Amino acid sequence: MDGEVLRDDQWERLREFVPGGRKGKRGPRSDGRRFFDAILWVARSGARWRDLPEKFGPYQTAKRRYYR
C-alpha cells in the first residue's frame, strides 16, 4: 500500500483544498482523503475509473465527484 496513498503530513497540507467532508443533502459526503487517493491512483496507473480498487470505494462515486 505504500506509494499508493498520501502520507498523513501530505494530506494535512492538501486537506483545505479538497472540497467535501461536510454533510450533503442526501447524507454525509464521501471521504476527501479517499477521493484524493483515488484520483492519484487513476493518474499514476493510467487505468479507467471502472478499474479503481475497492479500497477507494465505489468507482462511480469517485468519478462523479471528480467530474463535478
Image (cartoon, rainbow, N blue to C red):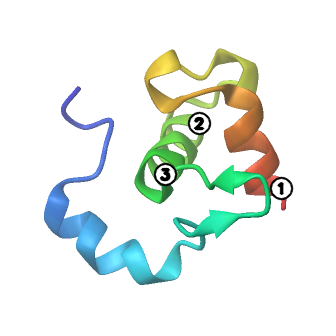
| Of callouts 1 and 2, the N-terminal one | 2
Marks 1 and 2 in Cβ contact (< 8 Å): no
Residue behind mark 3: 31
Q: Give the number of the disc on residue 67.
A: 1
Residue shown at the point (53%, 72%) measured from the top left: 18
Which quarter of the rendering shows the N terminus?
Answer: top left
Determine whether 47 is above or below 18 in the image: above
Disc 2 target residue: 42
Q: Residue at x 49, y 58 (%)?
A: 32
Whole-Å distance between the Cαs marked 1 and 2? Answer: 14 Å
Please tell me which of labels 2 and 3 falls first in the chain. Answer: 3
Q: Nearer the viewer, mark 2 or mark 3?
A: 3
Pointer 2 and pointer 3: residues touching (CB < 8 Å)?
Answer: no
Label 2 SS: helix
Amino acid type assigned to the residue bearing label 1 in the image: Tyr
Q: Is disc 3 surrounded by few (<14), some (14 to 19) or many (20+) residues within 10 Å?
A: some
Circle 3: residue type = Asp
Query: Which residue shows up at 65% across the image and 25% down it?
Result: 47
Image position, residue 60 (x, y; %): 77, 31
- First in residue order: circle 1 vs circle 3: 3
Residue 61 spot, x, y in % from top left: 72, 38
The span from disc 1 to disc 3 (Cα, nearest Å) is: 16 Å
> Which image quadrant is residue 62 in?
top right
